[in-house]
Image (spheres, rainbow, N blue to C red):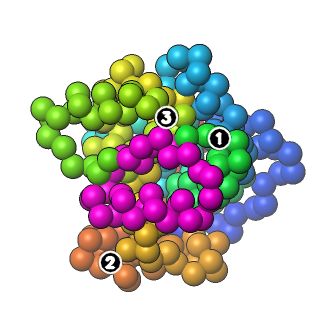
Amino acid sequence: MSAEQALPRPQPARPGSNDHGGVARVGGVPVSTLSLQALIRRMLEEAPLRRSLGERALLVFDCNGQGLSMNANDPAFRADLAQADLIHADGQIIVAASRWVGGPAIADRSSTTDMFIDSLKSAAASGVRYYLLGGDERVNAECARRIGEMAPGLKLAGRRNGFWTPQEEDAVIDAINAVAPDVLWVGTGKPREQAFCVRNRDRIKAGWIVTCGGLYNYVTGDYPRAPMWMQKAGLEWLHRMATRPKQLAWRYLTTNPHALWLIWKHRHG
């Protein structure tokens, strides 16, 4: 039985309860109640303004079952996650749990892949510039090509693969700052991407910095997405485990039960 299946059936979010955003505490992590579309609107409106004014970049991290487990087990990851300005619900278990434990309800799941893909055409129309950091060179380049086809007119500020040595990190930051993107997408996987963002947020010239894990691989099709019915049912993790068992089976079999226990443990806040 999955963590999602073990939870009581979630109740619908209260109409209008998430229109302006709030915070739901799930498994010990403060998660934004913003809907996917509200999150996208905020990003596209706020990121260019912050960047143009030279304000400190907003850190946007995601939360799913793995994140809950790592937050409890890894002190360094917990410290980095605590530095986020906004944490959104990347996993359906987080949305369901917010309605199960009471308090503010999270509007819906805002998977990073949906957040990225659903924002492309609006970003192109409004001139919001993205920078893609992460993945291997082939995947990163192919992702850049595909989103150009998906959203003609999209202004890609730049891109770079996710492999560099500590000695090369300054050059990575310099390359980003040379183009000063509105949104920097960082996809190097937990916990590396969070550590990179926290370590360099005061040096990076961008409006928003958003962690995105394996996003680029999903855009290119290297990682297949689950059918929509599985996504809506909170079973995308099962599809991922079935299609990439060597990489993900152990992760889900260990973090899902732990995440469920953490949700129960912190059910009263």
First along the sequence among labels 3 and 2: 3
Kind of residue sitting beneath label 1: Gly
* Label placed on residue 45: none
Q: Which residue is mark 1?
A: 127
Question: Which residue: 33% across, 43% down?
Answer: 193
Q: Quadrant of residue 152?
A: bottom right
Question: Which residue: 56% across, 54% down?
Answer: 116
Question: Which residue: 31% across, 70% down?
Answer: 248
Kind of residue sitting beneath label 2: Arg
Mark 3 element type: loop
First along the sequence among labels 3 and 1: 1
Q: CA distance from mark 3 to mark 2?
A: 33 Å
Q: Is residue 252 above or below residue 202?
A: below
Q: Quadrant of the C terminus?
A: top right
* Label placed on residue 181: 3
Answer whether residue 188 is visible to the viewer in this image.
no
Reply yes or no: does residue 227 show up in magenta: no
Image coordinates for residue 185, horizontal then vertical, percent: 45, 45
Q: CA distance from mark 2 to mark 1?
A: 36 Å
First along the sequence among labels 2 and 1: 1
- Is label 2 or label 1 in front? 1
Q: Quadrant of residue 6?
A: bottom right
- Answer left or right for 153 relative to 138: right
Kind of residue sitting beneath label 3: Pro
What is the magenta range?
130-159
Q: CA distance from mark 3 to mark 1?
A: 11 Å
Image coordinates for residue 107, horizontal then vertical, percent: 72, 52
Within 10 Å of disc 2 (Cα), the crowding (few <14, some 14-19, many 20+) is few
Q: Is residue 204 above or below residue 233?
A: above
Q: Which residue is mark 2?
A: 244
Mark 2 element type: loop
Residue nearer the viewer, 137 or 2: 137
